[in-house]
Amino acid sequence: MMTRLALVAGAWFALDSNAHATSVDLGVNALAATTGTAAISIDVAASPTFSLEGLVGAGRSTIDLDGGQRWDYVWHPNNLVGKFYFIPDKGADRFHALVFGCYESRIFQLRDHDLDFDPDVTARRIGAGAGIGWKQVFDVGLVLEATAGAGYEFARCEAYETPDRSGEVPDTEWDPLLVLARVGLGWRF
């Protein structure tokens, strides 16, 4: 995953010959225990007023169904975020507007049922959105950031994977609204 982030950042600088990195921030989701999603990010500043962040994450949860059955699922959110800083102090910090693209996958497994096999459902979606945020960079290099945004999915693919059938699934009740909300803690290099 970090290789993908490095490739994205490298491609950005290769395509823009005037870009000079003023800072690189590495961060983690500070609220991973409460949100259920562990995430790491790399935020590369192309100028004092613009940065590009790649964020990859993973989480696990359970949905209880009627009859004692449950869906166990794992999800992997991946976001690419462009941030536009209005009045930076140390460069690529303070209040900013953001736009983001999202690619997310979920793998559902049905548990505690009376079938001979464990059916799996794989779901993927792509979307985009916008939001706002605040990044505080302290003199020692510590970075604290809060962001909030919303968007909408514009493509979804779902498929069953079972021993006797495979194909498209009509709908998995996955809300098309995308929410980007996090508190990040990191370090500036």
Image (cartoon, rainbow, N blue to C red):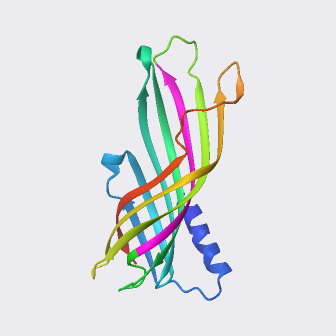
State the image quarter where residue 9 is shown: bottom right
**Residue under the image location 56 percent in, 12 percent down:** 115
For the residue pair 15 and 173, the one nearer the viewer reads as 173
Residue 61 at x, y = what percent? Answer: 41, 36
Q: Could you say where residue 7 lies in the image, as x and y percent from the top left?
A: 61, 68
Above-or-below relation of 162 to 50:
above
Residue 174 coordinates in the image, percent (x, y): 54, 38
> Toward the viewer: 74 or 94?
94
Image vertical order of residue 133 relative to residue 153, above or below:
below
**Bounds of the magenta segment:** 96-111
Image quadrant holding the N terminus, namely: bottom right
Magenta stretch: includes residue 54: no
Q: Is residue 127 above or below residue 59?
A: below
**Residue shown at 43%/14% (left/top)?**
67
- Residue sitting at x 39%, y 68%: 133
- Give left or right: position of 35 versus 115: left
Residue 30 horizontal/vertical position (percent): 32, 58
Q: Is residue 3 left or right of residue 134?
A: right
Task: Single out the residue that lies furthest toward the bottom.
Answer: 18
Q: Main secondary structure of the magenta part?
A: strand
Say how many tags the image has.
0
Tell me, yes or no, whether the highlighted magenta stretch contains residue 101.
yes
Quarter of the figure with the C terminus: bottom left
Q: Is 46 drawn above or below residue 34 in the view shown? A: below
Q: Choose between 162 and 70: the one closer to the eye.
A: 70
Q: Residue, x 28% and y 78% (percent of image)?
A: 138
